[in-house]
Image (tube, grey):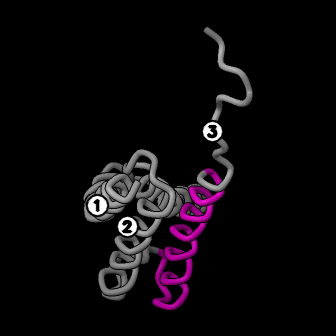
Amino acid sequence: MRRSESDVPFRAPTNLATWIVFALGAASWLGLAAVARDVEAWDSPFYFVVVLPLSIVVGAIAGRRFGGPSVRWPLAFFGGESAVIAAIWATRGVSSLWPLSCAFVFFFALPCWFAATLGVRARRARA
């Protein structure tokens, strides 16, 4: 059975929020790299004091406000960071540590995923 246009929920705010979280992840990497004057933001101790807690808060708020699959929010945030990492490495020609960086990004995304899951559950409990 084919769904009509009126059966499909309006998802524009959620899609826009996903892109905003993606841009926030990219901006957090670029901003901290500029402040720390290093190519890789996680070389700075501020990454663990500012950016990771920011990702947790953003994941929880986005999960609570917009719901959806809880994995969406850490994928968006750390996808933004990964896009910046890939762009930097593509322009500099240094990509030998790409698999290790992917593992780090996955590991750093786990607390954000947990917070987003709690946010989505709180949204469902409220409804």
Is 66 drawn above or below residue 29 in the view shown? above
Helix, strand or loop at label 1? It is helix
Tag 1 residue: 118
Q: Position of residue 42 (x, y in %)?
A: 36, 76
Is 8 drawn above or below residue 38 in the view shown? above
Magenta residues, start to end:
15-39
Tag 3 residue: 9
Q: Position of residue 119 (x, y in %)?
A: 35, 62
Helix, strand or loop at label 2? It is helix
Mark 1 Cα-neighbour bin, 10 Å: few <14, some 14–19, many ≥20: some
Mark 3 Cα-neighbour bin, 10 Å: few <14, some 14–19, many ≥20: few
Lower sequence index among marks 1 and 3: 3
Residue depicted at 72% across the width and 30% down the height: 6
Q: In the image shown, does 15 or 108 lie closer to the viewer?
A: 15
Q: Hey, which residue is sitting farthest right in the picture?
A: 5
Mark 2 Cα-neighbour bin, 10 Å: few <14, some 14–19, many ≥20: many
Is 62 drawn above or below residue 3 in the view shown? below
Residue depicted at 36% across the width and 81% down the height: 47
Magenta stretch holds residue 24: yes
Residue depicted at 34% across the width and 75% down the height: 52
Q: Amino acid at mark 3?
A: Pro
Tag 2 residue: 60
Q: Amino acid at mark 2?
A: Ala
